[in-house]
Image: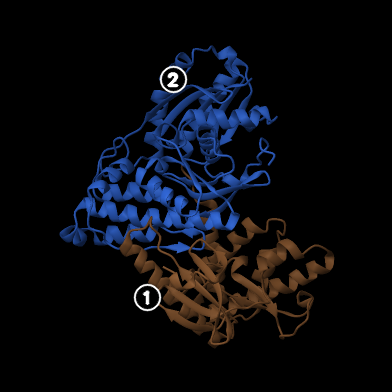
Chain colours: A brown, B blue
Amino acid sequence: MGEDLKDLKILKQGAEGKLYICNYLGKPTLIKERFKKKYRHPDLDENITKERIKNEARSIVRCKAAAVRTPALYLVDFHRSRIYMEHLEKSITVKDFIINHVKGETDKVKLGLISKLIGHTVRKLHESNIIHGDLTTSNMLLVQKVKSDDENWLDGELDIVMIDFGLSFIGSSGEDKGVDLYVLERAIISTHNDYPNLFEDILEAYKKQSKKNLGETISKFEEVRARGRKRTMVG
Amino acid sequence: MVIAIGFEGSANKIGIGIVKDGEILSNCRRTYVTPPGEGFLPRETAEHHRQNIHTVLREALDQAGITPQEIDVICYTKGPGMGAPLMVCAIVARTCAKLWKKPILGVNHCIGHIEMGRLITKANNPTVLYVSGGNTQIIAYSRNRYRIFGETIDIAMGNCLDRFARVLKLSNAPSPGYNIEQAAKKGKKYYQLPYCVKGMDVSFSGILSYMEDKIDELLKDYTPEDLCYSLQETAFAMLVEITERAMAHCGSDEVLIVGGVGCNERLQEMMGIMCAERGAKLFATDERFCIDNGVMIAHAGALAFESGATMDFNDSTITQRYRTDDVYVTWRND
C-alpha cells in the first residue's frame, strides 16, 4: 500500500486515512488514501471503503451544481482507495480559526459572519438533498473569497469550502436533514463550548436562507434532539 | 481517609459495595434474570431489588468487616435509570443515612462507571466508550466535565443485543449479551447488516428492525450463531469507528471501555487492534466492574465527598434522566 507515495509529504493522518500533497498535472494536489481497518471484517471493510469513496466523489460533483464550494475532484482510484483533489494551500479549518484566531470583539463580529456563512452553506447542501453526514467545524475550510497574494488574508473577505464527504449521501427527508443538523450541533457543543451561541447563530442563518420545506426539517431536528437528550438512559 | 458505601440499582442488578480510599472492601450483587424472550420491567425489577437489598447490604458489611459507624458517606445512584428500581436503593440509602447519622450523596451512574474504570485500570485521561444496556456514549474529559462527543441517536448497544437475543429466544442467564457473545464465537458466515455512523454518533435501531423483519428468511441460510456473529462484527465496528474518530478529534491516545457490554471480549479485541494501529493504549475491565455494581457508586461518591461535595437530605431524590455532562466534576483539576 502506498509504495509510490512514500516520497510524498504527509499532510495529515486522520482516523480513516492519510493525506498526501503532490503535484498532479501541474496543480497542487491532495491525495486522500483510505487504509484498511484490520479490526473490521474484510467484507465489511471493503464495502465501507468503496462506499465512502463513491459518496465523496458523488457529493463533490453534486455540490458544484448546488453552488457549494468544495475542492475540485481530479481523479478517483478505486483500486488503491485513493481520491485526488485540489489542494487549497491558503486555507484554515473553521475549528482552527475559532480556537486560535478569535480573540477580541472585532473577531467576534467576524465569527458572526462566519456563522451566517456556515448556516447558508449547510442550507444550500440540504436544498440539493446532499446530507453531509459528518458536519463538524473541522470539515469546513475558510478560504479567500477572491484569490490574492495578501499575507493577512484572514482579515479579508472569506468563503467556506466543505470537505470530507465520506459519510455523505443523497436524502430528501426531513429526518435526514434534521439528523445532519443534530450532528453539527453536537460537534459544536463538544468542540466550542466557550461560544454557547454559535450553533444558534448558524441555525438562524440556516432558517433565514429560505422558507421552502423548512418546517419539516426543523421539527424533525427538534425530535431527534429530544430523542438524544431526553431518552431514558437505563444503566 | 474516606470509607464510602454505594447502593446501585438503576437496572436489573442490585449491588452494594464498600471502598476505603480506592481499596475495594466488598462488592456484592444480585441480578434479576427474566425468562428467554422477555425483558425486565420496572415493577418486577423493583420487587426483585426490594427482596434482595437487605441480604446484599448485610453481605457487603460482613465482607468488608466494618461497622456502619466507620462509614463516612452513604452514596446511591441518583440516575439515570428506571424509576422504580432506583427508588428502592434511594429509600434504603436514606434510611441508612438517618439510622447511622451519616451524610448522603447521590451519584450519576455514568460517572460511577467512568471513575471505576479509571481506578481499576489506572488510565489517566482516556477517551471513554461507555456501552451498556441503556447507554452508548463516547466521552472525554475537558475542563471539569465529562463531555459527550458521540452517542447513539436511538437505542443503546446493549438494548439492541438484548432485544436480538429475545428474537432468537436465547437465555437471559447470566445475561443475553453474554449468550450472544458465546454464540458468535461459533458463527462463520458473515451477513452484511445496515452500518449506520453519523459523524460521531451511531444508530442501532435500523439493524435491530432489519433483523426482526427478516429473521425467518435469514434463518433459512444462516444459523443463529452466524447472525450473532454478524451482528457483533457490524455493531462493534461502528463503535470502534466512532471511538477512533473521537480520539482523532481530541488528540487522545488512551481508550477506556466501561459498561456492561464493555466486558465483551470481541469488542475489546477489535478496540485493541484499532489502538495498536494508531499507537494508543486500551484499558478495559472484567465483569466484576464493567457490569453495574455498588463499588463504582461508592468510589465516585467518595471522590466527590473528598473534594467537598455535599447533598442536602431533602435533595436526595432520584431522576430517570441524568446526563453525564450535567455533573460538574469537582475532583479533577486537569
Determine the CA span between mark 2 and mark 1: 64 Å
A125 lies above or below B71: below
Q: Secondary structure at mark 1?
A: loop
- The answer to whether B102 appears left or right of A79 in the picture is right
Query: Along the line of sight, which residue is nearer the eye, B12 or B269?
Result: B269
Quarter holding residue A202:
bottom right
Circles 2 and 1, Cβ within 8 Å, touching? The answer is no
Q: Amino acid at mark 2?
A: His
Task: Find residue A79 and name its label.
Answer: 1
Q: Position of residue B269 (x, y in %)?
A: 38, 47
Mark yes or no: residue A105 visible: yes
Q: Position of residue B282 (x, y in %)?
A: 47, 44
User: Which chain is disc 2 placed on?
Assistant: B
Query: Which residue corresponds to the image point at 39% horizontal and 56% vertical from the top-left?
Result: B237
Q: Position of residue A232 (x, y in %)?
A: 49, 47
Quarter holding residue B20:
top right
Query: Along the line of sight, which residue is nearer the eye, B329 or B37?
Result: B329
- The answer to whether A48 appears left or right of B100 in the picture is left
Task: Find residue B54 and name its label.
Answer: 2
User: Which chain is disc 1 placed on?
Assistant: A
Crowding at mark 2 (Cα within 10 Å: few <14, some 14-19, many 20+)? few
Q: As drawn, which residue projects farthest toward the right?
A: A105
- Of discs 2 and 1, which sits in the foreground? 1
Crowding at mark 1 (Cα within 10 Å: few <14, some 14-19, many 20+)? few
Residues at discs 2 and 1 both on one chain: no
